[in-house]
Amino acid sequence: MKQTDIYVLSGFLGSGKTTLLKEILKKEKEIGRKVAVLMNELGKVSIDSNEIEEDIPLKELLGGCVCCTIQDEVEAQIQTLLMEEKPDVIYFETTGAAHPVETIDGILSPIFADRLRFKGIITVINGKQWLERSTLNAPVQQLILEQARQASLLIINKEDQLTEAEKAKISFELQSICPHAFTILTTFSKFPFEKLLEMNTQVYDNVQKTSIHKLHLSTFVYTFKKMIAADEFETFLRELPDTIYRIKGYVQFHQSKYPDLFQYSYGMPLFMQEDMKMPLNMVFIGENIDWKLVEESLNKL
């Protein structure tokens, strides 16, 4: 089965995400991959989509944020792209208000998660805005911090507006917050494209070998081959590390005619009975997790 790479473009309002997306699409055209784009805007009218060339499949998500109000729509649009366009890669440009964990949760549906390969988060930071973030309210400051902390690739944009001392200060602060990310200062979001191609948070075989995966948000998709015991699954959940933030998917227990939809958010499990057969895929999102150990525990169920 063909897997499509998916990247998340993150960053606060005005950081330069759309400029970065245009730069990425130009590079993708040069290497000949088939690209699709998802754009999420909080307003009812999209301004940024006019920037995307007409030959690139584009789905717009307007009037809400992927984190909360339009998750179902996100799922439908990604499924349509996978079925109709069969792209090699999808770029998802989020709203400036989107939290990284919630965004990944919104795009990885258990229905098609085995067809997507989550490659990581590219976060764009407006250098001046970073230096002046203490003037923003506390929730916004925290959001900008999380967007930076969870990045695989950090682009510090608008460096032409910064002094050498300011560049050094921002670089030092961001490398302290996010030591695993490749960090680059840039103007107009121009960056070495090969760094994007090297991003790979999905592969978990090297977790022990390389420190680059530590303190890193990553995903894991597991497919159940059989029905399992409910009490054993509950024991499995109790033993999970605290840094598994989200789980969602379908699991079928003995004596059940159909699978249950299972959702887990920061330690709280929820089961909902389904009335039809569903793919027994389960999507995990966590930080600093050895997914091999999780897989081994699931195989024992």
Image (spheres, grey):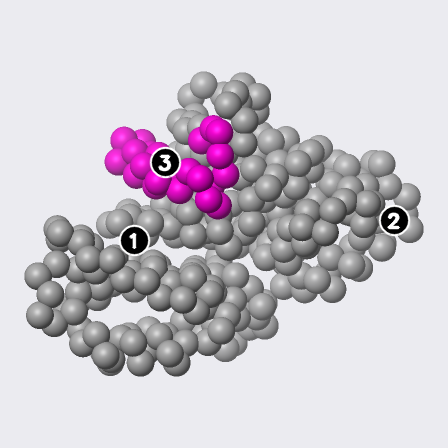
Q: Is residue 82 visible?
A: no
Residue 110's mark? 1
x%, y% of residue 288?
52, 71
Residue at 52% over, 20% down: 45
Identify residue type, mark 3: Glu
Q: Please identify the quarter of the rendering in which residue 203 is found.
A: bottom left
Q: Quadrant of residue 215?
A: bottom right
| SS state under label 3 | helix
Of helix, strand and loop, which one carries label 1?
loop
Label at residue 73: 3
Magenta span contains residue 141: no
Q: Is residue 22 left or right of residue 173?
A: left
Is 77 situated left or right of 232 in this image? right
In the displayed structure, 97 sits above or below 226; it is: above
Please report the residue visible at 48 percent of the width from the left and 57 percent of the height from the top.
Answer: 200
Range drawn in magenta: 61-86
Identify residue type, mark 1. Answer: Pro
Circle 3 packing at 10 Å, graded few (<14), some (14-19), many (20+), is some
Question: Viewer-nearest of labels 2 and 3?
Answer: 3
The verdict on residue 78 being magenta is: yes
Please report the residue visible at 35 percent of the width from the left and 75 percent of the height from the top: 237
Q: CA distance from mark 3 to mark 1?
A: 15 Å
The quarter of the image holding the C terminus is bottom left
Q: CA distance from mark 2 to mark 1?
A: 44 Å
Marked residue nearer the N-terminal end (3 or 1): 3
Q: Tell me the residue at 59%/42% (across/down).
A: 97
Q: Tag 3 or tag 2, which sits nearer the N-term?
A: 3
- Residue at which label 2 appears: 166
Question: Is there a contact, CB below 8 Å, between mark 2 and mark 3?
Answer: no
Sequence-wise first label, 2 or 1:
1
Residue 227 place in picture, x, y as percent: 14, 69
